[in-house]
Structure formats: C-alpha cells, structure tokens
Amino acid sequence: AQTVTQSQPEMSVQEAETVTLSCTYDTSESDYYLFWYKQPPSRQMILVIRQEAYKQQNATENRFSVNFQKAAKSFSLKISDSQLGDAAMYFCAYRSAYLLGNYGQNFVFGPGTRLSVLP
Amino acid sequence: ETGVTQTPRHLVMGMTNKKSLKCEQHLGHNAMYWYKQSAKKPLELMFVYSLEERVENNSVPSRFSPECPNSSHLFLHLHTLQPEDSALYLCASSQEARGTGANVLTFGAGSRLTVL
C-alpha cells in the first residue's frame, strides 16, 4: 500500500519570502499522480497543483511550483512571494494512475503541514 | 450554486440523536465521497459512490450510513454516535473514467460535527 509522509507538522514564513514544504511517498508503481491541496481556515480543501509522474517537467501554477524527484520519491511544494492568504494546512496526496476494479478510490493523503505567514 | 455544497456547516448532537449530513455537487461529476478529518490524523476515506458501484470501507462503524439517491446528492445518516466521532466530515466529488487516476477531487467546506 502507498503511504505519504509530510515530516513538517508546522512551518512559518515571512510575508514575501519563499517557503518549501516537504512530501515523500512510498510506492512500487511507476505511473501515478501527485497533488498538493490547501485547506485554509474556511475548511474547504482546494487543489493547488498536480503532477503526472511520467512528466519530467515540474508543474507550476503562478507562485506555486513543485520539485518532483521520482527516484527519491520526493514531491516538495515551493511557495514564492508568500502572502497572508497562503496561511493554511497543506496536504500532499498520491493517486495511482491506473485504477483497477474499484475506481474512484485510492487517494492517499499525508498528515498535513500547517503554514503560518508572518506579516 | 457552483462546486460542492455541504449542509449543515455545524452540527451538535447527543449520543441518542439521529441526524443527517447533506452534500450536493453541481459539477456533473460521477463519483462522490465522504471523508472524516480528525485532529492530528490523515484524512480517512469513509465511503465512495460512483455511477456503477458503492464502495464501503469496512472499518466504518454501522452507525454511519451513506445514501446516494442520484449522482448529484450524497447523504451521511448518523445515529447513536460516540464522542470520538466528533470531527470535520468532508464531501468530495470527481469525474472518474475507468482505468485512470488522473482526475482530481473537488471538496466541500465540510460539516463540523460535535457529539456530546
């Protein structure tokens, strides 16, 4: 079974600075998807970024980018020019690329990292 | 309304009460999910419904009963809950295609449940 680990329960960053959140995962599969979700105090989980494992190029969405190291099974999230609105819980998630049988499942979430942004 | 809507946002109930959580998705998705989010624990998948099958997690106690009358609505019926069931219950939906895990989950804002 796949597992997702986020080793930093809490982090803080100064406004306008850059912060990197760590995520590692364990899998024997070669093809899969990785996600970062953000959960602000409003509680609604929002997709931040998605990475296909077969793509070597790191995904980027505005100020958010990832460093995907497939061999190391590492998927870190970099937030540039941090803003107060970035304060939230961030969850890393894994999903198999090929779902056999009971499709609609198999999202595996990490325990989350709480990010504080200091003014 | 757009996205995934959950009601109520907050619910306080006694251990002998019967209540229901409601989820509605306006995205035309074909799969819906219930997740439980407790403090200091990873998200726990409780139930999945798709057009073709309902998937249950066998570790979910029978005091939680899901209902999916159509592809847009999902309920979680609650009865004789325990204080440890207090948590944030998140509904999500996705558009699934057999054989691929490409699609993302879209979440609702959750229902905060407190069992006294």
Image (tube, rainbow, N blue to C red):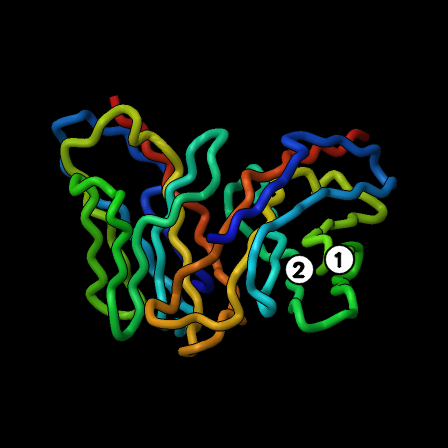
Pick the front one: B66 or B109: B66
Residue B88 lies in quadrant: top left
Compared to A15, does A100 lie above or below? below
Q: Which residue is mark 2?
A: A49
Q: Residues within 10 Å of mark 1 (few under 14, many from 20)?
A: some
Instruction: Specify the amino acid type for callout 2.
Output: Ile
Label 1: chain letter: A
Instruction: Determine the residue located farthest toward the bottom in the rendered image.
Output: B98
Camera-side residue: B105 or A54? Answer: A54
Secondary structure at badge 2 equals: strand
- The part of the image, by quadrant, that contains residue B52 is bottom left
Across and down, in percent, residue B14 comes to 19, 25
Tag 1, which secondary structure?
strand
Label drawn at residue A58? none
Is residue B19 visible to the viewer in this orientation of the structure? no
What amino acid type should be assigned to the residue bearing mark 1? Gln
Horizontal side, residue A65 vs residue A42: left or right: right
Q: Name the residue: 21% across, 40% down.
A: B61
* Residue B35 shown left or right of residue A82 in the figure: left
Label 1 or label 2, whichever lies nearer to me, is 1
Mark closest to the chain's N terminus, 1 or 2: 2
Q: Is residue B96 above or below residue A46?
A: below
x, y (%) of residue B99? 44, 77
Question: Could you tell me if residue B72 is visible in this image?
Answer: yes
CB atoms at circles 1 and 2 under 8 Å apart?
Answer: no
Looking at the rendered structure, which numbered label has been put on residue A69? 1
